[in-house]
Image: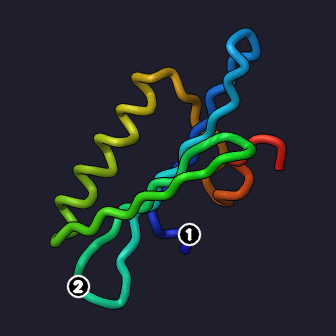
Amino acid sequence: MSDTPHVCFRKLDPQQNMKRYYCILLTKPLFDEWCIVRTWGRLDREQTRRLTVACEREARILFDRLVKNRHARKYHIIDGANAASARIGV
């Protein structure tokens, strides 16, 4: 799984009581489609969304766009090797 593109972000702002994380994973399930899995939330809430795309090129373009959007929203990249480490307080 080390070759699988993935990245985890964290956004902390104690003044606004903001403790968020956001993980993006690009994977290829059993069939020929590609899947982007996004997980985000706080300590007490988590949401997951999966999006299936037909080709690798399209999946990588979307993955890069999602990463760029997180940077624009002032999220900071943390170690993406273990998605669970992105969860604040875990």
Check the image and name the residue furthest to the bottom: 30
Q: Where is residue 68 in the image (x, y as percent from the top left)?
A: 36, 33
**Foreground: 18 or 24?**
18
> How many marks on residues?
2
Position of 88 with respect to 42 (left or right) is: right
In the image, what residue occupies the spot 40% across and 71% down? 27
> Which residue appears farthest toward the front when viewing the image?
45
Residue 6: % across, % down: 49, 57
Q: Quadrant of residue 64?
A: top left
Question: Which residue is drawn at the image coordinates 29% and 41% (left, top)?
Answer: 65
**Mark 2 Cα within 10 Å, few/some/many (few <14, many 20+)?**
few
Q: Give the amino acid at mark 2.
A: Asp
For disc 1, the neighbor class at 10 Å (few under 14, some 14 to 19, many from 20) is few
Give the residue number, with chain letter if any, for mark 1: 2
Q: Which amino acid does label 1 sit on?
A: Ser
**Residue at the spot of label 2:** 32
Circle 1: element type: loop
Taking 75 as reference, is 67 above or below it? below
